[in-house]
Image (spheres, rainbow, N blue to C red):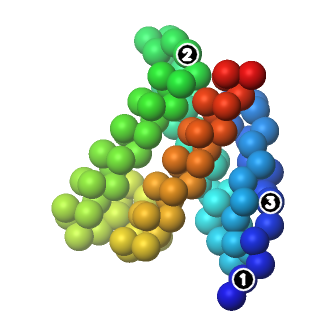
Amino acid sequence: MSTVNTVSVHILDKEYQVACPEDQQAELIISARYLDKQMRTIRDTGKVIGLERIAVMAALNISHELLKAAGQGAAPAIAGDVDAAAITGLQRKLDEALHQLRQLEIS
């Protein structure tokens, strides 16, 4: 069993503290960088305004990539192999990040 630590990730110039098992920290950091890249791309188009809307659009795009990759039996859009446990883990982390984002916006 691995130790759970708090990992600091930056998404759209905001810092988030995420609890993560030690053996999954590298994956979390890669996921956060990917999410940050997707959100920046959406924001830079100028068509979507508001952090929550940008996050939702990024989540939809990433979900579409995962579903498309699962349908093809490969994951061309995402580096490395993706299995059901990895997808579930990424979804959980995305949910946590979105929850924290909402909490910051409420504050």
| SS state under label 3 | strand
Residue 34 appears in the picture as rendered = no
* Disc 2 residue crowd, few under 14, some 14–19, many 20+, Cα 10 Å: few
Circles 1 and 2: CB distance less than 8 Å?
Answer: no
Quadrant the C terminus occupies: top right
Is residue 23 visible from the viewing direction of this image? yes
Mark 3 and mark 2: Cα distance apart in space: 27 Å
Identify residue for label 2.
50
Q: Quadrant of the N terminus?
A: bottom right
Circle 1 or circle 2, nearest the eye: 1
- Given contact means CB atoms under 8 Å apart, are the residues at marks 3 and 2 in contact? no
Q: Earlier in the sequence, mark 3 or mark 2?
A: 3
- Hey, which quadrant is residue 30 in on the image? bottom right
Q: Nearer the viewer, mark 3 or mark 2?
A: 3
Residue type highlighted by circle 2: Gly
Amino acid carrying mark 1 in the image: Ser
Residue type at numbered disc 3: Thr
Tell me which residue sits at (80%, 60%) in the image.
Answer: 6
x and y percentages locating residue 26 in the rendered image = 69, 67
Residue 31 shown left or right of residue 67 in the figure: right
Could you tell me how far apart the alpha carbons at marks 1 and 3 are, in whole angstroms? 13 Å
Q: Tell me the residue at 50%/64% (across/down).
A: 89
Q: Residue at x 46, y 15 (%)?
A: 48
Estimate the spatial distance between the alpha carbons at disc 1 and disc 2, rounded to whole Å.
37 Å
Residue 79 image label? none
Read off the residue under disc 1: 2
**Above or below — where is 101 with respect to 51?**
below
Residue 66 shown left or right of residue 14 in the figure: left
Q: Position of residue 73 (x, y in %)?
A: 23, 70
Q: Which residue is mark 3?
A: 6
**In the depicted structure, whether residue 88 falls above or below residue 58:** below
